[in-house]
C-alpha cells in the first residue's frame, strides 16, 4: 500500500466525505476516490459501502482506521526525529576525559552544549589515559580529552589543543608563597602531595625531579587533582599541578606560582581513525574548542607554537 492511499483514507475517516478529504489533502475528489479504491484492492476487504455515489465506512474500516492512526502518529514522530537529526537536536555523545577536565572546563562545555542541543544526551566518563585511549580504539566513546603523546598507537587521531605549563601550588602561609616564581631547586626536600604514580602528570614530574636530582617527601597520593588541591589547602604540602586545576582553587587558601624550569605538555582531543563523528559529536567538539579559546584568554593555557 502507498502512503498517499493511507493519507486519503485517514482524511476521509476524519472528515466524512471525499470532497472534504480532497480539500484537506489539496487534491481532486476523483483522485481521493481512486486512492480509496486502490487501498481496498490491496487490503482485500471492503472499507466502504457505496450507494448513490456516497461512501459509508464499514465496521472493518473503523477497525483499520485505529491502526492507521497509530501509523500516522509514528510517521509524524519519524519526521520529527529526521528534522531533529538534520538540525543536530537528536542523538547522544559520549566523551571520555581525564578527571581534571571533568571537574573543570568540561562542565561549562556541557552547559553551553545542552543550551543549544536540549534533546541530545551527553555522557561523560572520567578515565585515566590508558583507559580513554582504549575507549577510542574500541569505539566506546565519540571523543576523548587527555594529555598524551602516544595516542597514535591506539588508532586515534590526535588534535593538540593547547600547551600547558605546570604550576606549583602551596598554602598561602607556606614560605614558597612569597616567591614570584618557584625554581626547581627551591623544591629540594619539600613535602609534596602527589597524584598516583600511574598518572601521566606524575610520571612527567617524577622524571624532571630525578633529572635535576630533586628529592622530595611525599605526604599523600591522590587519584584526582581535586583531592590534591584539597590537601594543599589543608597545609599538607606543595604540589605540581596542571594549570587547568587553578579553576579548582577559587575560595581556597591556596596560591599558584609559575615554575622555572617549566614542565610542559599538551592537551589533546582524540577521535577514532575508523569511525566518523556524528553531527552532534562535531557540535560538542566545537564547544570544546570555544572553551579552550576562553582558557587561552584567561592565561591558563598557552597557544601552540
Image (cartoon, rainbow, N blue to C red):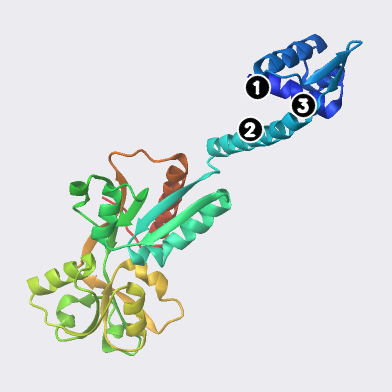
Query: Callout 2: helix, strand or loop?
Result: helix
Q: Is residue 159 visible?
A: no
- The residue at the point 83 percent across, 19 percent down is 23
Cα separation, mark 2 vs mark 3, equals 20 Å
Q: Nearer the viewer, mark 3 or mark 1?
A: 3
Q: Nearer the viewer, mark 2 or mark 3?
A: 3
- The residue tagged 1 is 3
Left or right placement of residue 78 versus residue 36 in this view: left
- The residue tagged 3 is 61
Where is residue 73 drawn, in percent x and y? 68, 36
**Residue closer to the observer: 43 or 211:** 43
- The residue tagged 2 is 75
Assign the N terminus to one quadrant of the image.
Answer: top right
- The residue at the point 44 percent across, 56 percent down is 123
- The residue at the point 29 percent across, 56 percent down is 132
Where is residue 71 drawn, in percent x and y? 66, 33
Say whether disc 2 or disc 1 marks the residue closer to the N-terminus. 1
Query: Callout 3: helix, strand or loop?
Result: helix
Amino acid at each position: 500500500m502507498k502512503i498517499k492511499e493511507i493519507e486519503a483514507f485517514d482524511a476521509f475517516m476524519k472528515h466524512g466525505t471525499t470532497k472534504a478529504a480532497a480539500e484537506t489533502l489539496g487534491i481532486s475528489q476523483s483522485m481521493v476516490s481512486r486512492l480509496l479504491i486502490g487501498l481496498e484492492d490491496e487490503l482485500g476487504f471492503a472499507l466502504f459501502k457505496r450507494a448513490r455515489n456516497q461512501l459509508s465506512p464499514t465496521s472493518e474500516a473503523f477497525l483499520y482506521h485505529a491502526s492507521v492512526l497509530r501509523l500516522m502518529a509514528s510517521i509524524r514522530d519519524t519526521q520529527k526525529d529526521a528534522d531533529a537529526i538534520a538540525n543536530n537536536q537528536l542523538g547522544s555523545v559520549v566523551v571520555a576525559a581525564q578527571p581534571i577536565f571533568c571537574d573543570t572546563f568540561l562542565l561549562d562545555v556541557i552547559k553551553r552544549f545542552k543550551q543549544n542541543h536540549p534533546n541530545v544526551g551527553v555522557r561523560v566518563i572520567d578515565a585515566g589515559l590508558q583507559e580513554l585511549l582504549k575507549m577510542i580504539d574500541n569505539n566506546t566513546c565519540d571523543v576523548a580529552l587527555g594529555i598524551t603523546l602516544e595516542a597514535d598507537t591506539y588508532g586515534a587521531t590526535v588534535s593538540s589543543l593547547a600547551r600547558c605549563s605546570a604550576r606549583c601550588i602551596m598554602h598561602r602561609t607556606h614560605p614558597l608563597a612569597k616567591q614570584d616564581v618557584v625554581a626547581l631547586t627551591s623544591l629540594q626536600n619539600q613535602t609534596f602531595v602527589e597524584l598516583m604514580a600511574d598518572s601521566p602528570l606524575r610520571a612527567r614530574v617524577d622524571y624532571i625531579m630525578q633529572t635535576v636530582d630533586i628529592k622530595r617527601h611525599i605526604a599523600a597520593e591522590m587519584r584526582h587533582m581535586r583531592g590534591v588541591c584539597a590537601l594543599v589547602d589543608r597545609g599538607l604540602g606543595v604540589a605540581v599541578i596542571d594549570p587547568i586545576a587553578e579553576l579548582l582553587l577559587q575560595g581556597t587558601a591556596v596560591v599558584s606560582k609559575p615554575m622555572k624550569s617549566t614542565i610542559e605538555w599538551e592537551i589533546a582531543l582524540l577521535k577514532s581513525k575508523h569511525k566518523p563523528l556524528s553531527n552532534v559529536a562535531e557540535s560538542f567538539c566545537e564547544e570544546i574548542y570555544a572553551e579552550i579559546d576562553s582558557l587561552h584568554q584567561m592565561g591558563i593555557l598557552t597557544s601552540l607554537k
